[in-house]
Image (cartoon, rainbow, N blue to C red):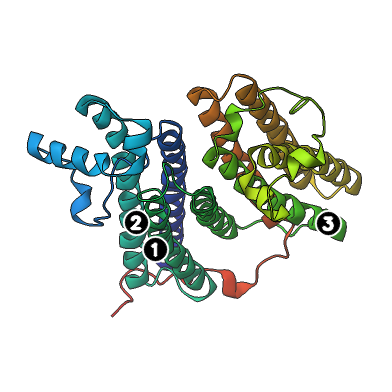
Amino acid sequence: MAGISAKTSQLRAVRVWLFSVAALIVLMVLVGGATRLTESGLSIVEWKPVTGALPPLTEVQWAQAFEGYKAIPQYRELNAGMTLEEFKTIFWWEWSHRLLGRVIGAAYLLPFLYFLWRGAVSGELGRRLWLIFALGALQGGVGWWMVASGLSQRVEVSQYRLATHLVLALLIFAAIVWTLRRLTERPPVVALARLKITSVVLLVLTFVQLYFGALVAGLRAGRVYNTWPGIDGALIPSIDRLLFETPWWRNLCDNTLTVQFEHRMTAYLLFALAVVHALGALRSRAGRAVISGAWWLAAAITVQATLGILTLLHQVPIDLALTHQAVAIVVLTLAVLQVERLAARRTERDQPTLVPVGQHG
């Protein structure tokens, strides 16, 4: 009995740990969104993984940080004449974003090492957790790679790198959500193959939409074409306007009209597919959890689309924009849960190996 109790306790601790890391990632994504909306992302022009954890503590250090910012194109072309107090406002946003990254790294690595030492994770679970750690380490490098794109030739970061940074963060979040669900015992689900396929397509399409949303943010495309349902005077803009850049494929990520149009069309597709999936779940009688999961996902996508329209019509106020981003994370979470719910049940090797306390040598 003591061994079973210790096993249950360790499993609960692993769940609390992963849930806490997931919550921190959500907070970091939202702070990152605010950093982008306030044009604060280039306020720190150096990457100091260790010493950068401390902000400027003296007026001399603040002056040095401000001088570094003055040397980049964004200051010269967009913020010339900014005061030190105004600089401090954008600095704190970016510093908070980077500090959260460091906190998440420590919050993941230290408990992970402890659980490894205690023998609480191994097998398939251990391999998955190592992969998540590797993705987190990669994310730190991608963050600086993104910032570096705006320090010399541009007045803002590359929208490609911004989108990569966001999608990688949400991929890590999705992997943690999936892992959390795999630690929960549930009865097997019998569902039609097409229901499983539509759930996977919904998840993939959600990631595509997140990427397009990041491109919209990177290009500030939400601040133009602020009408709905029409865009540029029509429901579907002319092909000459959508593909005026050469080669044509550059329009897909560089043309503000095309990028916003892609984002809109993908939203419509997501909504339609979510309704089809929910109706399919209802007809299949796959179980209450599957049916409710499908309808919750459809509802969240509906709310998200509505928020997107309001954000556009009001020209991207920060409160609406961050709410739009927060609900996007809810949509992603529900999509991950629905795919996992319909996936083939895990085998014994997916379970954590939990060693009772006192048996570690």
x, y percentage for residue 21? 42, 50
* Left or right of 152, for residue 262: right
- Sort mark 1 into few (<14), some (14-19) or many (20+) by Cα contacts within 10 Å: few
Name the residue that disc number 3 marks.
Answer: 191
Mark before the other along the chain sequence, 2 or 3: 2
Considering depth in this image, is 4 or 198 the residue closer to the camera?
A: 198
Residue 180, horizontal then vertical, whole percent: 54, 55
Residue 137, disc: 1
Query: Mark 2 to mark 3: distance in Å?
Result: 38 Å
Picture layout, residue 158 above or below residue 307: below
Q: Is residue 71 left or right of residue 287?
A: left
Circle on res. 105 = 2
For the point 88% across and 46% down, the residue is: 280
Q: Residue drawn at (43%, 67%), measured in percent from left and top?
A: 134
Q: Nearer the viewer, residue 51 or 252?
A: 252
Q: Quadrant of residue 185?
A: bottom right
Q: Amino acid under label 2? A: Gly
Residue 41 appears in which quarter of the rendering?
Answer: top left
* Element at label 3: loop
**Callout 2 environment at 10 Å: few (<14), some (14 to 19), or many (20+)?**
some
User: Tag count in the figure?
Assistant: 3
The label nearer to you, 1 versus 2, is 1
